[in-house]
Image (tube, helix red, strand yellow):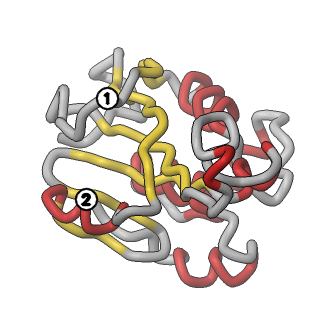
Amino acid sequence: MKIPLDNETAREKHNDMCCGLACLSVIEEINIEKVLKNWKEMGMKFEGYCRYTHLKDYLKIKDYDVKQIRWNKLEIVNPNSFYILRVQWLGNNLEKIEKPFYGWSFWNEASANTHFIVLHKSKVFCNSEGIFDYDKLSDYLGDDGLITSALEISSQNTSSTHEVKK
């Protein structure tokens, strides 16, 4: 796994709202701006951030096998797959600490305080923190981060130009 060459530039350009694009960039091993170009060529609209469903749609169009999975434990299910993990940062409203608000007063606040990261084998990529070892994921999440869901991504067609690198 490699940090996209244009990661810092993309973060500045998109006000740190490009974590989803960066995840796709890491999986495809291309620059973030190339992902954004592909995104637009697919007829998808970039609204300044990526929704979970948009990531899934993009990958399916690119012929990846994508499954939404429950992430109850911090364990790697398939070491040959990539995982996009949705991190929910918790707010301070203890009366609304359970989903869908996760400590925020409104759903849109909760949604605005999410982040996407990639897990592959024993490494984690975060567009703001770089690449770190999987065993440091709990440290990254701390007391305020919670993985709420995950996409498992693998390649169905081994002759595909979009094959997931092992």
Q: Position of residue 91 (x, y in %)?
A: 63, 60
- Position of the C terminus by quadrant: top left
Q: Position of residue 130 (x, y in %)?
A: 36, 74
**73 left or right of 95 in image:** left
Residue that sits furthest to the front in the current view:
95
Between residue 44 and residue 122, name the one nearer to us. 122
What residue is drawn where x is 42% and y is 34%? 162
**114 left or right of 127 in image:** right
Between residue 132 and residue 30, name the one nearer to us. 132
Mark 2 lies on a secondary structure that is: helix
Give whichever of discs 2 and 1 has the lower sequence position. 1
- Position of the N terminus by quadrant: bottom left
**79 left or right of 37 in image:** left
Mark 1 surroundings within 10 Å by alpha-carbon count, few (fewer than 14), some (14 through 19), many (20 or more): few
Between residue 161 and residue 126, name the one nearer to us. 126
Observer able to see residue 37: no
Q: Position of residue 12 (x, y in %)?
A: 68, 83
Using the image, tell me which numbered label, if any, was put on residue 126: none
The residue at which mark 2 appears reads as: 138
What residue is drawn where x is 38% and y is 70%? 3
Where, by quadrant of the figure, is residue 107 drawn?
A: top right
The residue at which mark 1 appears reads as: 72
Q: Which amino acid, by three-letter code, is at mark 1?
A: Asn
What residue is drawn where x is 50% and y is 22%? 63
Observer able to see residue 144: yes
Alpha-carbon span between mark 2 and mark 1:
14 Å
Where, by quadrant of the figure, is residue 92 drawn?
A: bottom right
Q: Is residue 13 above or below residue 107?
A: below
